[in-house]
Amino acid sequence: MNADIRLHDLVALLEGLPARHFETGAPLMLDRGQIGTVVMTYDGTAFEIEFAGADGRACALLPVPAANLMKLHHAPVAAAA
């Protein structure tokens, strides 16, 4: 269970995944490091992730196991002294 990942977080794939284009159904390959946004959680073991193209439009939407995701951070977190 990955309690660190929450709704609307930015995440990156740790392994590539096959997918289908959100609108056209054309096959896609989402590579390792592909960035997406969490749009739904499934009890912390998997998350529905929306992947977008450079234009910001959704290109894929699929469930991804928590073990295949890394949460991205915008700023450093203060360390306890």
Image: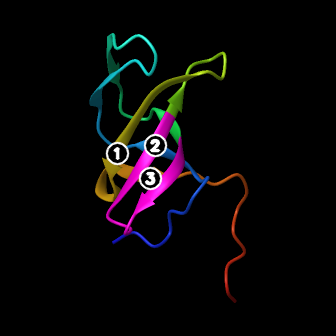
Say how the picture is coloured. rainbow
Which comes before the other along the chain, label 2 or label 3? 2
Q: In this view, which residue lies farthest toward the bottom?
A: 81
Q: Residue at x 50, y 31 (%)?
A: 51
Relative to 57, 43 lies left or right: left
Image: magenta residue range = 37-50
Badge 1 vs badge 2, beta-carbon distance below 8 Å: yes
Report the residue at 73% width, 57% height from top.
75
Question: Which residue lies under the disc numbered 3?
Answer: 70
Query: Would residue 68 be found to the left or right of residue 61 on screen?
Result: left
Q: CA distance from mark 3 to mark 1?
A: 14 Å
Give the label on residue 49, or none.
Answer: 2
Front residue of 38/78: it is 38
Q: Main secondary structure of the magenta part?
A: strand
**Dot 2: element:** strand
Q: Where's the C terminus, which quadrant?
A: bottom right
Determine which of the numbered discs, if any, sits on residue 63 in the image.
1
Q: Position of residue 57 (x, y in %)?
A: 61, 21
- Residue type (three-letter) at the residue carrying disc 1: Pro
